[in-house]
Amino acid sequence: MKFKDFVGNDKVMSEIKSLMQQNRFPHSIIIEGEDGVGKTTLAMLIAKWAVCSSENDDKPCEVCNNCYKAENNIHPDIITITKPKDKALIPVDMIRVIRSDAYVLPNDAEKKVYIIDDSDKMDAYSQNTILKILEEPPKTAMFIMTCVSAYSMLETVRSRSSIFSLLPVDENTAVDFLSEHCPSYSRDNIISAVKSTNGNIGKSILALDDSYFSNVNETAEMIALAIGDIYEFSLLASLYTLVSDKNFAYDVMKALIKIIRDSIVFSDKIKSLSMSSKSVEYLAGRLSKRKLLKLIEVLYNSQKALDSNINLNLFVTWLCIKIRESLQ
């Protein structure tokens, strides 16, 4: 089994390849992990393996007609479902179409593969709709669901699926991979991008391509400075920059945790490790170590809240209250 353009997560890949070699690959899997770790990439590679028409074990062969179509995203038996941009959730009608279509024989390959990206964007009703086919799936269908956390899915759906958890790769591996695949960027820029994303290759590419993480760090610093402000309005106003994008809000929380951690270090007269030295020194001078530690706990809980698909407007209000409570 070969999977080009996928690095890291060796234990997970070893398990996946073993199941393929033993012809025991499950009919339904959930691939979980933070955005940018390669969930969709892995899903597409598994789909290519499933439709590959080679009779050898070394799949996907990359030369058969099915592999060609899969590589160019034109294979009729690989069906990808994504949340429409104008919807908050994946409509149940899209799931009903999958349920009906799965019983129709494949067009070119031996299997149809249904990839549901961001499957945690299905509400309970939609998940129960897909559950009906997971309980008695046709032999010619495979289902791959991707999400940040499998625990955002119903327990009944999880119990009928194998779960594979992806993590960011180590920084050296990420740097080597990006140096090979993004030759137009200097190695120094790549190293900086990888460090800012803790080895998350997808987010590293995003950091190289635009000012996304500059915006993340600037927003985190703005919120950090507002935390020390005596006026609650300043904090609420800064937090409302998070309401448009859950992934952006999650990354800002990660950056903010780094700032708070460095504020604790700075308060011990040790040089700050954060690039946001202004906010670090500001918080270290205004808040005690006890309050800073309470803030970190609040921010970790905020990440859990985002994982649970909380409404972002409610999230901002809740977070403002919790931050204020931690400072009392």
Image (tube, rainbow, N blue to C red):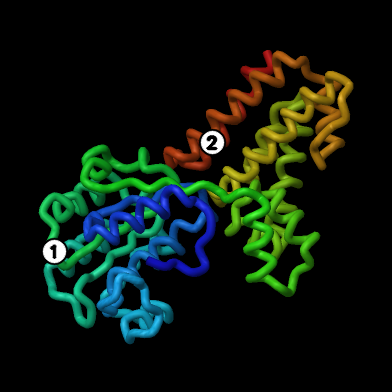
Looking at the image, residue 189 sits to the left or right of residue 86; the answer is right
Residue 217 image offset from top left, x and y in percent? 73, 46
Q: Residue at x 19, y 49 (%)?
A: 131
* Residue hosting label 1: 139
Question: For the point 31% across and 81% down, which residue is it?
Answer: 66
| Left or right of 45 in this view: 261 | right
Among the two numbered marks 2 and 1 on one chain, the one whose residue lies closer to the N terminus: 1
Quadrant of residue 231 in the image?
A: top right
Element type where label 2 sits in the image: helix
Residue 308's disc number: none
x%, y% of residue 122? 32, 50
Q: Is residue 278 left or right of residue 89?
A: right
The CA span between labels 2 and 1 is 39 Å
Q: Is residue 272 above or below residue 240?
A: above
- Residue at the spot x=34%, y=85% of the render? 64
Q: Residue at x 30, y 70 (%)?
A: 57
Residue 325 on image: x %, y %: 62, 18
Placement of 292 over or under 159, stated as above or below = above
Residue 112: percent from left, percent from top:
23, 70
| Number of other residues with Cα within 10 Å of mark 1, as a class: few under 14, some 14 to 19, many 20 or more | few
- Depth check: 15 or 307 in front? 15
- Does any portion of residue 14 appear in the rendered image? yes
- Front: mark 2 or 1: 1
Residue hosting label 2: 303
Picture quadrant of residue 55: bottom left
Q: Which amino acid lies under the numbered mark 1 shown in the image of this protein?
A: Lys
- Position above or below: 45 against 128: below
Amino acid type of the residue that numbered disc 2 sits on in the rendered structure:
Gln
